[in-house]
Image (spheres, rainbow, N blue to C red):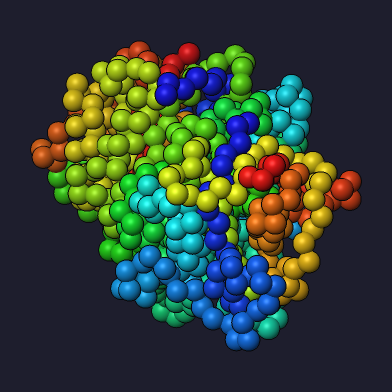
Amino acid sequence: MNDAFVTGLGLWTPWHADLAAWRTGGRAPEPSAPRGLGLPPGVARRATPLARLAADVLHQATTEAAVPASEVAMVLGTVAGELGTTFDTLALTTAEPPSSSPLRFRNAVHNAALGHLAIAHGNTGYASALSADAERVVAMSLLEGLGWLQEAGGHVAVLVVEEAWPGHDHPPLGAAVLLSEAPASGACVHGRLGDVCRAVPDLPAGAHDEALAASPVRGVLDLLGALTGQAQGRVRLSAPREDRTAWTALFRPASS
Amino acid sequence: MIVRPYPVTAWTVACALGADTAAVRETLRAGRSGLQPVGEARGLPFDTWFGALPVEDLPALPAALAERDTLQARMAAHLTSGILAAARGAVARWGADRVGVILGTTTGGIADTEARYPDWTPEAGFPDGYDLARQHAMQATSEVVGALVGATGPRWAQSSACSSSTKVFGSARRLLDLGVVDAVLVGGIDTWCRFTQLGFRSLEVLSSRRCAPFAADRDGINLGEGGALVLLERQGEARAWLHGVGETSDAHHMTQPHPEGAGLGAAIRRAVLASGISARDVDLVQAHATGTPLNDRAESLAIARELPHGPLVVGTKGYTGHTLGACGAVEAALCLLALEEGWCPGTLTRAPLDPELAVRVSPDPVTQRFRYALNLSAAFAGHNGAVLLEAA
């Protein structure tokens, strides 16, 4: 498996509007909602919270990588996707008389966020929405992104996002990792990432905010912690099993 | 870049045409539709047609998988039984962690979720332990299929609306190209649910008549359920070959295709270029052909532009209904049948065909040795897919 340059990163949580805020180790006193950066205001209003979250992290990663959002392939990985919108729609479809809403129905589709992003940025390239369980979701998203990069080159934005599930406590959380065949001029290079497999991780788990650690996509926190901390080795992308193995990726920092 | 072809070593299908591959073949050969009228009896406040899987009472999952039990999971287990020996053979040959599972779906476990939703509360959740991650989520059924065949490699659900199980072929190619697996079981499965019936009704694209792809008076889709599974291996005895896969976005509209079929045309172009063949070599196109005025017009423009030599174009949703996230796999299976048997069903529709659609559609079956078949899908969010398959 070829590895890829990591040229852009993004993170959003209710208490961290971007990666820089998260890296301070603190948190905003009040939670906020994702803004939908890069989406026209009308689109952002009609888009779901998950789509606005994906837009925010994509914006951060493409800005850092100095690559237009119109020119990146996109992989969207989540465990449960547009669950809030699905539940809102179920309230209509299970009522008497049953009905639905065109806006809710189209926004409940798992790949809706990618549609909003493609339309907003005029991106006619490859985009793919996947769902995997909490153990695999970060690793499978990276595999799909690395696979595309090997097939087509260029840049691929791997967006791993999860919204708060109805009736569950975990907060929304999203991250973006922009992988490049070659860095764009003026881009930041964090290092190289590849060799996604199940193995014993080299790098210790980070100490994460308790609320965020409850997210099904908490693996992105360990990944971003390793990438921003320039720690060389095998990064955990999921909680280890009893045999100490986990889904991992090999990271070689730019400074190595 | 011209891609390396991978052998299709086994496949199976179950849909409104039949409960297994043999029954599907027999019904298709007889020219019969699997669509039936549905309405109030299935809880719908309107009349439409639906392609139901002709299986009464799908059996429960094995005890070890009981916590994942849903209609979709049961359908997946039924479907897996049609390819179990071949898939377990691949696991034995390559090793469990070298076999991946990637399934396309749009419904996931929604049929079960909607049945329980009236009893759901934010505080207590679902009353009978129904679990969103294990049962509702799109990935839940890929876990069931993986467990049934004993595969422990990469595993996920592709959920890009109606192109989901077309795009799984691209994902599988990439995993094989990366060298992280030696075999991938791909496919798609979607089930009946009121959620999609009511949703498409709200978009005014559901027909109250039997759908009629390419017909002059076509007025919308009928839904269907079922799925197909296809085993791709690094090497093995080929029943057919997987070549290039094209995947694009329209960047045009959330639910309507680009009016000129620009994105779908680009997907066709990419699939053909990646396969290293001439567009003229394509002799069969399995069209998405939903039967909506917009889809069939845009798709016909894309096909006519990219494949001007006029290959045979077939639309099969008049037999199966639109199986949504499963349609790419179901229709790939029908392509494989055509490649293996040198026979393609006629497009089940209504006369007259739309004279403005400049593609070669035959209402009658065609007997011909097909070499290259192109399977097309288009989807919400503007996601398009094209898969090129070659006869062995």
From the viewer's perspective, tell me whether residue A36 is left or right of residue A145. left
- Residue drawn at x 27%, y 30% as measured from the top left: B313
From the viewer's perspective, tell me whether residue B229 is left or right of residue B166. right
**Whole-percent x, y for residue B289 in the image:** 29, 42
- Residue drawn at x 35%, y 31% as measured from the top left: B270
Above or below: residue B148 compared with residue B221: above
Above or below: residue B81 compared with residue A140: above
Q: Within the image, what quadrant is residue B123 found in?
A: bottom right
From the viewer's perspective, tell me whether residue B189 is left or right of residue A101. right
Q: Within the image, what quadrant is residue B154 found in?
A: top right
From the viewer's perspective, tell me whether residue B385 is left or right of residue B262. right
* Quadrant the N terminus of chain A occupies: top right
- Residue drawn at x 49%, y 62% as measured from the top left: A60
Front in this rendered view, residue A89 or B34: A89
**Whole-percent x, y for residue B343 in the image:** 36, 20
Front in this rendered view, residue A160 or A83: A160
Q: Farthest residue in the bottom direction? A: A29
Q: Farthest residue in the right direction? A: A243
* Quadrant the C terminus of chain A occupies: top right
- Residue drawn at x 47%, y 66% as measured from the top left: A56
**Can the viewer see residue A194 in this picture?**
yes
**Can the viewer see residue B226 in this picture?**
no
Front in this rendered view, residue A198 or B169: A198
**Whole-percent x, y for residue A49 in the image:** 48, 72
Front in this rendered view, residue B239 or B234: B234
**Whole-percent x, y for residue A197 in the image:** 72, 39
